[in-house]
Amino acid sequence: MNQPIKWVENQMPKTSDSQLKVMALEEIRKARTFHESFPQYSETPLRKLDEMAKYLGLKEVYIKDESYRFGLNAFKVLGGSFAMARYIAKQTGKDVSQLPYEVLTSDKLREEFGQATFFTATDGNHGRGVAWAANKLRQKAVVYMPKGSTETRLKNIQKEGAAATIEEVNYDECVRMAAAAAAKTPNGVVVQDTAWEGYEEIPAWIMQGYGTMAMEANEQLEKAGCDRPTHVFVQAGVGSLAGAVQGYFANRYPENPPTVVVVEADVAACLYKGAAAGDGDLRIVDGDMQTIMAGLACGEPNTISWDILKNHVKVFIAAPDWVAAKGMRMLAAPIKGDPQVTSGESGAAPFGALAAMMTMDEYKDLREAIGLDENSKVLLFSTEGDTDPERYKNIVWEGKEK
């Protein structure tokens, strides 16, 4: 018997919403322009699943496919690269708009700025993005990975020239290790997509970097004839991506925002727990957090994102592993006529949740709480492809869920 999906409607008290400005559209436009300056840049595809929409009883279903991002198979590089650029801009007294790729990688800037060492913790995708960006920008990177991280993901990071190790502790402890090591290193900088008291500037820049993906998707929807999505599903680990996507759409459609649903791995559902408590305070999950959704196995919420999410999100979902596996399989083997999407464990969780609630009677209340019906136009983000190809095959081909 599968573990049930847990969910809660957001009843938390609202705040002054002071963090929403982090995702102001002019800030996202700067990030988008920066990313467009990379020779490796191209928009990732927005897949329209017409047959799947009919099958699920929805009007339209769109999946933003991040497996094509910069050849890295995941969206995370958008955040790390923009944060590095903003950091270098600040240190050299420039605006980030003065530092496109060709300037950042120039000998002149190297002389002016020197070299920093960027420290981070990751299950794989964020660290690979930071390592790749550091390599391209001629900087150094040091990456700490939590226990349970796969050798494939470790090697992908090392291939980018970073010093990377798998540690015997969980993700949140790795974050603390990265911060401690950076503090002892000349020109050491933590590039982490989680914020805490006193560490909020770089995470805000990372969230703005993620905004490039939301802005691209929004423009692609409009080109496809969809004036705005009625619903947006987005996954969460620490919540940086979820806060970025929620923040972008709240700023983009202030009078008529889409209904946003946040999906977490049930063993690391810190946002869901905070929402279930209902008081608006942070909740922390610790321990090993064993889940196939490695990218979502984070137990300490990003403080900036939490403020945005509690003011705007409609429903928080805690999803067991079978939900992600279901999403992976359905996207890998779509209904005839729809494009295939290679979606990894963390990438497919929101679609798996959507499919479950639309096809399983026990989630009728959840479907109704979110307001999903034949008029709904749903946007989802497949944030990674098969970043660990063996694990992907085991789940999709062999039917394993571990």
Image (cartoon, grey):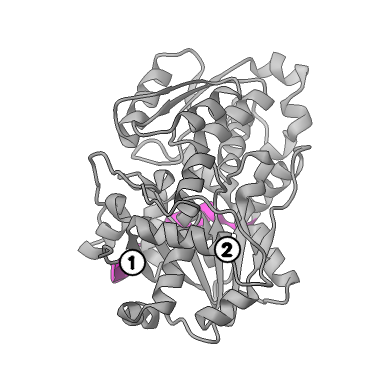
Judge whether residue 232 can be spotted in this image.
Answer: yes
Sequence-wise first label, 1 or 2: 1
Mark 1 or 2: the one toward you: 2
Q: Residue at x 51, y 17 (%)?
A: 187
Q: Crowding near pointer 2: few (<14 within 10 Å), some, many (20+)?
A: some
Secondary structure at badge 2 equals: loop
Q: Residue at x 67, y 76 (%)?
A: 226
Q: Which mark is residue 293?
A: none
Viewer-closest of 380 and 55:
55
Q: Which mark is residue 14?
A: 1
81 up-or-down from 223: above or below: above
Q: Position of residue 290 (x, y in %)?
A: 30, 43
**Is residue 176 one of those drawn in magenta?**
no
Q: Residue at x 33, y 66 (%)?
A: 14
354 up-or-down from 25: above or below: below
Segment tinted magenta in the rendering? 5-25
Q: Quadrant of residue 167?
A: top left
Residue beneath disc 2: 333
Judge whether residue 388 can be spotted in this image.
Answer: no
Secondary structure at badge 1 equals: loop
Q: Please state which amino acid type lies under the numbered disc 1.
A: Lys
Q: Residue at x 61, y 68 (%)?
A: 62
